[in-house]
Amino acid sequence: MKYISIIFVLVLSVLLGVGCSKKEKVKENAEEANSVASTQNVSEIDNVQLREGIVPNFSFTDANGQTTNFDSFKGKVTLVNFWATWCGPCKVELPDLIALSKEYSDRNVRFIGISTDRGSDVVEDVRTFVQKSGITYQIVISNDDIESAYGNIHAIPTTFIVDENGKIVESFVGVRSKEYFAQALNKALGISS
């Protein structure tokens, strides 16, 4: 019985040590990301206007320093992706989203990323991550109002495809492939695959 207790304590110690070391690596990676310069396509949401049946309107400052709002995307299909800098699955799909934003740049499609990161240095942290990752589309910092308006985001990544009229036509939680995103965008554009 004494040996079982000792073995149990040893196994528990090893498991706790492994868990703590993973947290330290995450912290080290976050500190590395903070050492890179910022970009201008990251901003905070200024206000949220809830509307029934269509996505909420919200305003933000774009990469050119101009205040713009989600309604300016009307007439375009928009991919809205909720994500975070610390989210492993978000990082997995990020290269596909970046590639698609470039491939669809000459089509009637806009991309907007909504970072769910929190903290006192969130804007700078997200800007650092955006520059290091090569994200070229607009990124805004989420708040409780926008998350609530999109149905209380409980997991990330969560992606919405919004049609030209501002209606959500598709939504999905979790990592998706480039092909999956392209198929959803083409469907919203009325292009058969």
Image: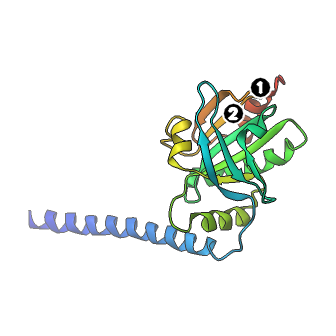
Chain-order first, disc 2 or disc 1: 2
Labels 2 and 1 touching (C-beta < 8 A) = yes
Q: What is the x, y in percent for residue 71?
A: 73, 37
Q: What is the x, y in percent for residue 92?
A: 64, 52
Q: Quadrant of the C terminus?
A: top right
- Lateral position of residue 12 relative to residue 76, left or right: left
Look at 56% across and 74% down and name the residue there. 31
Look at 51% across and 59% down and name the residue there. 118
Residue in the foreground of this view, choosing between 145 and 34? 145
* Dot label at residue 187: 1
Q: Residue furthest left?
A: 1
Q: How is the image coloured?
A: rainbow
- Which residue has dot 2 on it? 161
Location of residue 77 with respect to 37 vertically, above or below: above
Q: Secondary structure at mark 1?
A: helix
Location of residue 52 with respect to 12 vertically, above or below: above
Report the number of discs: 2
Q: What is the x, y in percent for residue 153?
A: 51, 41
Look at discs 2 and 1 and give the one toward the viewer: 2
What is the spatial separation of the Cα atoms under label 2 and label 1, in whole angstroms?
A: 10 Å
Location of residue 158 with respect to 183 vertically, above or below: below
Residue in the foreground of this view, choosing between 162 and 58? 58
* Dot label at residue 40: none
- Lateral position of residue 138 relative to residue 87, left or right: right
Residue type at mark 1 is: Lys
Q: Residues within 10 Å of mark 1 (few under 14, many from 20)?
A: some
Q: What is the x, y in percent for residue 49?
A: 60, 38
Q: Residues within 10 Å of mark 2 (few under 14, many from 20)?
A: many
Residue type at mark 2 is: Ile
